[in-house]
Amino acid sequence: MSTGSPVGSHRVVSPAGALPQAADRLDPDPEIADDEVRISVERLNLDAASYRQLHDAHGGDGEAVRAEVLAIIERRGKMHNPVTGSGGMLIGTVDAVGPRSPLGLKTGQKVATLVSLTLTPLRIDDQLARWDGRSEQVPTSGHAILFARSIAAVLPDDLPEHLALAVLDVCGAPALVRRVVSRRPERTAAVAVIGAAGKSGSLSLAAARDAGAAQVVAVVRDEIEAAQLRGSGLADEIVVADATDPLLLAKKVTKALDGDGADVTVVCVDVPGCEHGAILATATGGTIVFFSMATSFPAAALGAEGLAADVEMLIGNGYVPGHADYALALLRANPHLKDLFIDRVDHANRQIAGLFEQEQA
Amino acid sequence: MSTGSPVGSHRVVSPAGALPQAADRLDPDPEIADDEVRISVERLNLDAASYRQLHDAHGGDGEAVRAEVLAIIERRGKMHNPVTGSGGMLIGTVDAVGPRSPLGLKTGQKVATLVSLTLTPLRIDDQLARWDGRSEQVPTSGHAILFARSIAAVLPDDLPEHLALAVLDVCGAPALVRRVVSRRPERTAAVAVIGAAGKSGSLSLAAARDAGAAQVVAVVRDEIEAAQLRGSGLADEIVVADATDPLLLAKKVTKALDGDGADVTVVCVDVPGCEHGAILATATGGTIVFFSMATSFPAAALGAEGLAADVEMLIGNGYVPGHADYALALLRANPHLKDLFIDRVDHANRQIAGLFEQEQA
């Protein structure tokens, strides 16, 4: 039994020298290296952007979507949508653990992978026969490979699977918020979360509170979202503002903080153009954590310079050790947060159902 | 005399509510608000990307380039190239200082603006008559406005103007490197600078040393750059590697550090695709500072997650208080660094001259 590269480069077929995420094609050979883990796959959870693209490209024809996903997996050895560049995650059971795997997994455990499907070697053996191509949830069978530096979370017994997955999908955010807020002197940090009613936003509110923030401000886009948070106890103040209107956003956040900027600003809004508002809403010496994939690096860098803003800006790394357990613990400890999540998950399911209702109408 | 918005939004003509950088048009009225400063302009220093675009668009016709720059300034009230989105900086003399300006400037001082021309109200009164359109350096006259939150540096007496400008152009990098390295316990941090032979890279090397780094590794792209750094004393180790080849880069950096990753990695290479190499070259718990505008936010965020890398990633903010003085002090204290800069500035001048020689050949 050989030892693999901890980042999986021994599984890259082409191009030579690439990392698995950048690779065109991976080798999903079921024989594992002695630091790898093999998962018996039960379900793929396609990334929303990827599913939407496939759905639209085939005009909602589920059979065509199914055939294309199958073709991608067979051609690439991974479920890596070449158009969106995104993947998703998978659920399965640990099938084999190499003697030198550092992941701490045991055979028979039910797990979710927390690294993207875009870098996970995957082979399907049922032709996706049980999937109608009309949902992001793909029941299937086959196997996937985890490397030494992969991440997987054991699914908890006490939470419905779809709820646990929704939490695990964004679990990097609360862990990083906790770390950044904890660095401040206890009970002094004012924290503003922009896009606070979403999954990563609401978990960030709870993490800020848990880490000892003195004040937590939730910024949401409309009264509907404000109503969802009101009474939840997750925030001290709820502010309705357009995150892409920098002057107005900063004015409302500083007003909520009695004239000061936030010491820690967390950006969870998935639309472009939120960088300057976040910079203006942050106090001198404060920290901004950008979790939105719509963040523009130059807009943030040049914006802070142009505003002479002495703020530290972090790229929200989705990996912090212990992130999965921490996010699940926050949910368990906070019934209001759990209710918000249940609403979000139900809402997302209704949206997908709506895609098909629109076509039939 | 009225008080302006500290970020200059009172000068925005359109669209309403925008910040000056995002505005289509600014009002360069010479009458200043009581927290503004008026500069008598001597020279514009067009950003290299902007000048190159203008030059190419007009097939090297200097007269046409001159006419277009003039038209942009008249139409927009600022020198904001609509194609590249970039500007540059300017040199001039302080002409009037509002009584509530916090910038600490005095009438008669010669200054360079450190905020971009893309957000600086500007009016020209000589039709750019002294400029032939064939260089980034634009001698002119007119006036420009600084806001309360602008930044300008008084030009030093002891350094040639073009050398001081080259340093001021990248002065945010060494100041942020000093801050990040100084947080580590004294004389323990191993620092790797990727793209170490350039302007921001060589200043970052000097700042790492000054901040008490235990080991400084310079990563350069070829033997020519390695030779420039060798004997300079700026680095303990010089590594030649392609920054876009993640596995090879990480291997060479960790070899230079006796098997460990860097505690602080500084990315100054202006090409896309350097994120994953920087992540793999950094130790667990380390910090990466991205200064390159070619940095991709999603590549960094998803890359770290996919590699299960517990690293902190900073967006290189070009503004840190005291950055200009610190960068100039590093240059004065380090003759080797000064020589490198003189070579760079001469080389850049030769490249611009070369643009025209090629056309005549």
Image: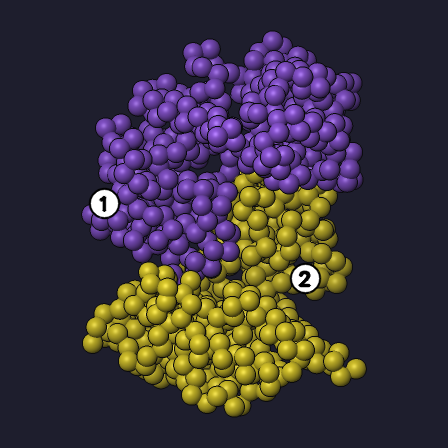
Chain colours: A yellow, B purple
Q: In percent of the image, x 69 and y 49: which residue is there?
A: A244
Residue A347 coordinates in the image, percent (x, y): 67, 73
Q: Is residue B146 visible?
A: yes
Residue B215 coordinates in the image, percent (x, y): 26, 38
Q: In percent of the image, x 65 and y 74: which residue is there?
A: A56
Q: Secondary structure at mark 1?
A: helix
Q: Quadrant of residue B126?
A: top right
Badge 2 and badge 1 both on one subunit: no
| Closer to us: A318 or A74 | A74
Left or right, residue B88 beside residue A107: right
Chain designation of label 1: B
Q: In percent of the image, x 72 and y 51: which residue is there?
A: A242
Q: Is residue A325 visible?
A: no
Mark 2 is on which residue type? Leu
| Closer to us: A4 or A99 | A4
Residue A133 coordinates in the image, percent (x, y): 59, 83
Residue at the extreme top of the image, as rendered = B108
Numbered circles on residues, count: 2
| Closer to us: A21 or B4 | A21
Left or right, residue B275 beside residue A228: left
Separation of disc 2 and disc 1 at Cα?
Answer: 52 Å
Relative to A39, say whether B323 is above or below.
above
Left or right, residue B274 beside residue B141: left
Q: Tell me the tag on residue B256.
A: 1
Residue marked by disc 2: A229
